[in-house]
Image (spheres, rainbow, N blue to C red):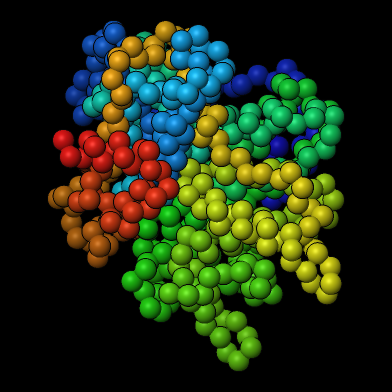
Amino acid sequence: MKTVAVSTVLLMSLSCNSKKTERSNEIPIISKILYDTSSMFYTDFSKYPKERKPLSIGIFDSGTGGLTVLEKFIICDEYNNLTGEMQPDGIPDFANENFDYLGDIANMPYGNYAQENKTEYLRELVIKDALFLLREKPSKIIVVACNTATAYGLEDISALLEKSDTGIRVIGVINAGVNATLSPLDRNADYAIGVLATAGTIASNAYEKTILKTRDEMGFKGNITVVNQPGTGFAESVDGEKDYTDHNLTAMCDSYRGPKCGRGENSIKPHLMDVYGFDTENGALFIKQAGDSLLSVQLNSSENYARFHLVSLIEKYRLSGNAVPLKRIILGCTHYPYLLNTLNEVISELRNYAKNGEYIYRSIIADDFEFIDPALFTAKECYEALRDGKQLSLQSIRGKVNAFVSVPYPDLSADKLNKDGSLSYEFKYGRNPATEDVSTVTVPLSPETVSGEVLQRLEKLVPHSYALIKETMKQ
């Protein structure tokens, strides 16, 4: 099915018996890992630990956004730990499990690789993330917390694990998010579902394909309209990428790569400025005007990115003329739940926004509308997989969290770096796959490797994960 901004998914448009086709273009790094003993990536999986229960659960994301997934793992209490029945028992389901978390900050945002025609390099990055959690920190299961990585690399990881003969499983967030969205719905009604994700995830069409497949499997008879919105700059602003959000700025900058003022589908529309409700204080927004004409706008806070993209999604749906109210919006990037309060505020504001006495958005937002965060459902899938495989930890002490991030390789030349020491955009998205060039290294997450601003945000928004990470920082 062709990817479009707003598309109606018909049950009869696809054969219910369609089979998943196997990807044939295996990327070179998989062969290097499995067979090339001269390669730095070669891994002898015959030496992989046979006793899996004590091993960690490995989780990775393109940045710190995946900690929202880890947070759900840590606080998840959906099962009885003794019987395995889906019944909370007051004890977190993963209380005794160890976690290794990797945030590939140096190479993010993953969503831009597709638009720069570098999907093969992105697939290689995803394999390298998984390899770290298999080789450097042996894991008993891999969780891909990044939607873009799931969309472009889950099949590659599955292929690697199958050929490694380790029996290790991999779980991605997209299926969990779609299952959570569709499972509670009446199979006979029509629905409108929004997907807010990175540009790369939207371009992959992964969510729409999965919605199609899942609705067929669940036997839906009604129509589902899918509204896609690429969140350009949203995740990057959450992780403090200077090309998208720089709190040191006092005026517009030439390096800005976020949404711009214009008439394009995903541009900031001058006539919607009162609908966006942007924060204009403390350098959160820069505006250039000539009289009453708005010439240029630069967003400079993650809250304003959240506002812009959510309003854009709902305005896009309003203009489509479809009268079925939006029932759910899937937060298809792990960074987006950090701004859930802002997103809910926008929904409330849109319900009450009136133009010429008419509430133009109220009828297209369902009364029981909700955002779907796939994280909890990913945790449940992981728990059931470990329980079914008899791999849940038997240790009696509370588990630990070791967190790692990628940083630029210390010996990179200055022409490959920005002034703040991060990889320059041109170098980051100009790299090619199938080489053994080293441009990043993995180090423990600490005050030396991430900014104080990021740590403060983590402490506030993922307090349970941060507390456990902080403990291992001190050791």
> Is 236 left or right of 472, judged from the image as shown?
right
**Picture residue at 82% right of the left edge, 55% below the top:** 363
Image quarter (top left, top right, bottom left or bottom right) of the N terminus: top right
Front in this rendered view, residue 439 or 442? 442
Q: Position of residue 391 (x, y in %)?
A: 39, 11
Q: Position of residue 472 (x, y in %)?
A: 22, 35
> Is 395 left or right of 412, judged from the image as shown?
right
- Up-down relation of residue 193 to residue 302 (above or below): above
Q: Position of residue 345 (x, y in %)?
A: 61, 58
Image quarter (top left, top right, bottom left or bottom right) of the C terminus: top left
Front in this rendered view, residue 448 or 370? 370
Residue 183 shows in the view: yes
**Picture residue at 43% right of the left edge, 25% below the top:** 92
Q: Position of residue 5 (x, y in %)?
A: 69, 50
**Picture residue at 37% right of the left edge, 58% below the top:** 240
> Is 41 left or right of 2, judged from the image as shown?
left
The answer to which image quadrant residue 257 occupies is bottom left
- Up-down relation of residue 424 to residue 374 (above or below): below
The answer to which image quadrant residue 50 occupies is top left
Residue 62 shows in the view: no
Name, please, the residue furthest toward the front: 90
**Picture residue at 26% right of the left edge, 41% below the top:** 470
